[in-house]
Amino acid sequence: MKVVLAYSGGLDTSTILVLLKKMYNADVITVTVDVGQEDDMINVEKRAYELGSSLHYTIDAKREFVEKYIFKAVKANALYEGEYPLGTALARPLIAEKVAEIALKEKADAVAHGCTGKGNDQVRFDITLKHYLPENIKIIAPVRELRLTREKSLKILNEYGYNIPTSHKKYSIDENLWSRSIEGGVLDDPFHEPPEEVFAWTVSPTQAPDQPLYLNIEFEEGVPVKINGEKKDPVEMIRYLNHVVGLHGYGRIDMIESRVVGLKSREVYEAPAALSLIKSHQDLERMVLTPREMRFKRLLDEMWSDLVYQGLWIDPLREHIEKTIDSMNKYVTGVVKLKIFKGSLNIVGRESIFSLYSKEIIDYNTGWYPSDEEARGFITIHGNYALTAKKVRSRFH
Ligand code: ARG
């Protein structure tokens, strides 16, 4: 049996590699998709061969991840339940697509992934794989099937004489350019404050520099293009923001999250670039969109984020929604000024050629003023439904 395994080099996928190889005598081809996780890809490859992979692929999908996934998320201000920028959720369909391509190319009998039966990722992987693969290529999920726990995995790997990094023993970590997620261990107690050791991208706000960091982020049609006036390559821009914003202690999230599979979980994330770009983008939208556009877009943004979270990237509705999101983003061009200081982020300035804000009109001392008559007329009509309803109903109480 030839199996293509979506391999990250972490605890679960390493165990699966060993199991498929030694227990089922499968021919295993490993695929690692680089979406900006900070692992050394050479090491991951080395480890895959040590554990018995017969052929390893490393696929650099960073640019595609940023341009076709992350930038769409920025345009949609995508925050699941108002907090989580969807790093893992966005990367899964891309990883699954790449793995499916290799499975077809290698004429595999099956595709394997390391998702558990309790998480969202199984949903995202399975749905995307089902879309790209014919029915005769099976999807196998050994962690789900064998109910492998992290402890059991550790035991199996130890039996085969394989050492895994200590950080993997304590927490389950998933990272890519857009966010780093930390689950498990002491974090499973939602009242227990995350210990400093879980964080890798952000310094503790108490340790952050005493001088604030100012950043000017320039958007063109909803997409960030320049930082402090300097054009940046998309991947580099995200990396840069994660780095400098994280150094100032901003980007931590600690939330109770509603999983697709019917359970609440406690999630800790680091996402300095994602949060600063989304907050800036949202701010610029407030300047260029009409209030009704904004209200309608909030519904679309939320729907888009829910689809992504729920593993429904391939749902045609996503593309319908994106058409409207894109058409409103035509006007999200301009600069947003951020001030990041000891774990907080404030937007302290913005400008746009499409600005609906006019200093001349809003100024109390000069410029346009509605006349008393104009104002009274507007208020009479504007309040008429409410005033009439109150009057009619008061007769019956
Ligand atoms: N809760 C997040 C999501 O469903 C992140 C899951 C990441 N997995 C992990 N092992 N930390 O998208």
Image: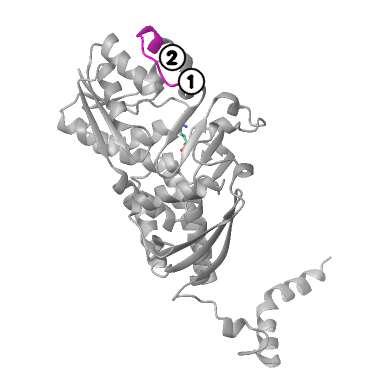
Amino acid type assigned to the residue bearing label 1 in the image? Lys
Q: Which residue is denoted by mark 2 in the rendering?
A: 154
Identify the residue at image location x=36%, y=17%: 15
Q: Mark number for residue 169? A: 1
Q: Mark number for residue 196? A: none
Q: Which residues are magenta?
A: 156-165
- Callout 2 touching callout 1 (CB < 8 Å): yes
Residue 333: image location, x then y, percent: 42, 69
Near-viewer residue (226 or 99): 226
Under tag 1, what secondary structure? helix
- 265 vs 353, left or right, is right
Amino acid type assigned to the residue bearing label 2 in the image? Leu
Figure check: 230 above or below 39: below
Of all residues, the one furthest to the right in this rendering is: 397
Residue 347: image location, x then y, percent: 57, 62
Under tag 2, what secondary structure? helix
User: Residue 28 is drawn in which quadrant?
Assistant: top left
Figure check: 86 above or below 393: above
Identify the residue at image location x=57%, y=45%: 249
Q: Does the closest atom of ligand 1 sit within 8 Å of the Cβ of label 2?
A: no
